[in-house]
Image: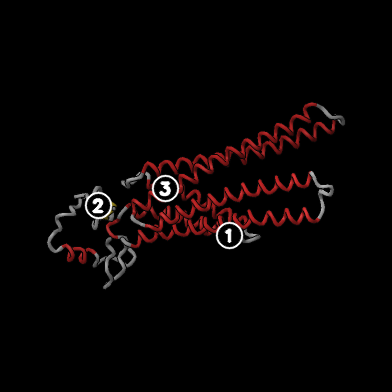
Amino acid sequence: MTKFCPRCGMPNEDNARFCVRCGYNFYEQPVGGENLNQQQTMNMLPGQPMGGNALLADLDTLRSAFFWLFLGTILLIIPLVDIVAFIFVLVGFILLIIGYGKISKSSLRNTAIYRSVRNWLIIYFVYELISVVFSVVIIILTFTISTTYYSTTPTTSTTSSIWPGFLGILIILLAVISLIIYLISYLKLISSLKALSEDLGVQRLRNAGNYLLYALILGIVAFVVSVIIIAINGVIASITTSASSPGIIYSLLFALVIPLVIGLVSYILQIIAYYNAYKGIDEFKSRYYYQGPGMPVNYP
């Protein structure tokens, strides 16, 4: 269990005697403490954070990150706004790195987990950036080699036949490495949301981690099912006299609907996860904001 300091809002162990941040004594309440709290809020404006807690500012970056990811992921479904959606997701991803970097330096209990997810997100971001640059260089190099060779030598050479095979193996290797880094980063993000739920005492953050886990499982299932279906239809087509018959084509299209539906459900779960992460942090922050004259101060 977690209890929160009424002075600075810092999460503490349930059996803690003093706040780990400000030293507040949980077992010796000052006389007239409630009047003191009321006096402290007299000059505050509605919406102003109680106690100037730095943790709230750090969490605000993470909250914004999940909001941008939530909005960008929704826009990815809508045609003709892919560029805008990509920008939103990119902004959310960068804010995610910054946000986890901030809370990894806080006095929360699971800072090691937040530091780890921050590092893996950076690795994934840098690797994808390098991959894009490398792919552009490969495309230019391939075009240059092809143009130079075919303009000078009309016959086939060993170099021209080896290069496409080497290029294909290299692209597959890069894709496999990217997938591994992505899966590790994704799992780290899931564990960080569950850790943050424990630190802040917000169940909704744990739900967000669970939704991301379900989305990952369904995404893997959709991929495996699609590969199996394509392989089965390939075998059937190879032993059928008419490989391009309408029956085989229709059966293939119908079979591919199954992984597409599973993938869509996975995508929706990911959107729900980002929304719950955003609202979960928002729920925690709302506990420490002055609501206005005559309204209660939301101490946990």
Q: Which mark is residue 75?
A: 1
Asked whether, in this view, residue 168 is left or right of residue 174, the answer is: right
Q: Give coordinates of residue 157: x percent, y percent.
A: 82, 27
Asked if residue 21 lies left or right of residue 171, the reply is left
Q: CA gap, disc 2 to disc 3?
A: 21 Å
Circle 1 sits in a helix, a strand or a loop, which is it? Answer: helix
Tag in front: 1 or 2: 2
Alpha-carbon distance for marks 1 and 2? Answer: 42 Å
Q: Earlier in the sequence, mark 1 or mark 2?
A: 2
At label 2, the amino acid type is: Asp
Query: What amino acid type should be assigned to the residue bearing mark 3?
Result: Ser
Image depth: mark 1 or mark 3 in front: 3
Q: Amino acid at mark 1?
A: Leu
Q: Which residue is mark 3?
A: 192
View extreme (bottom): residue:
294
**Disc 2 vs disc 3: Cβ atoms closer than 8 Å?**
no
Above or below 114: residue 30: below
Instruction: Assess disc 3: are there few (<14), some (14-19) or many (≥20) residues with their C-alpha within 10 Å of its C-alpha.
Output: many
Label 1 Cα crowd, 10 Å radius (few <14 / some 14-19 / many 20+): some
Cα–Cα gap, marks 1 and 3: 25 Å
Q: Which residue is mark 2?
A: 14
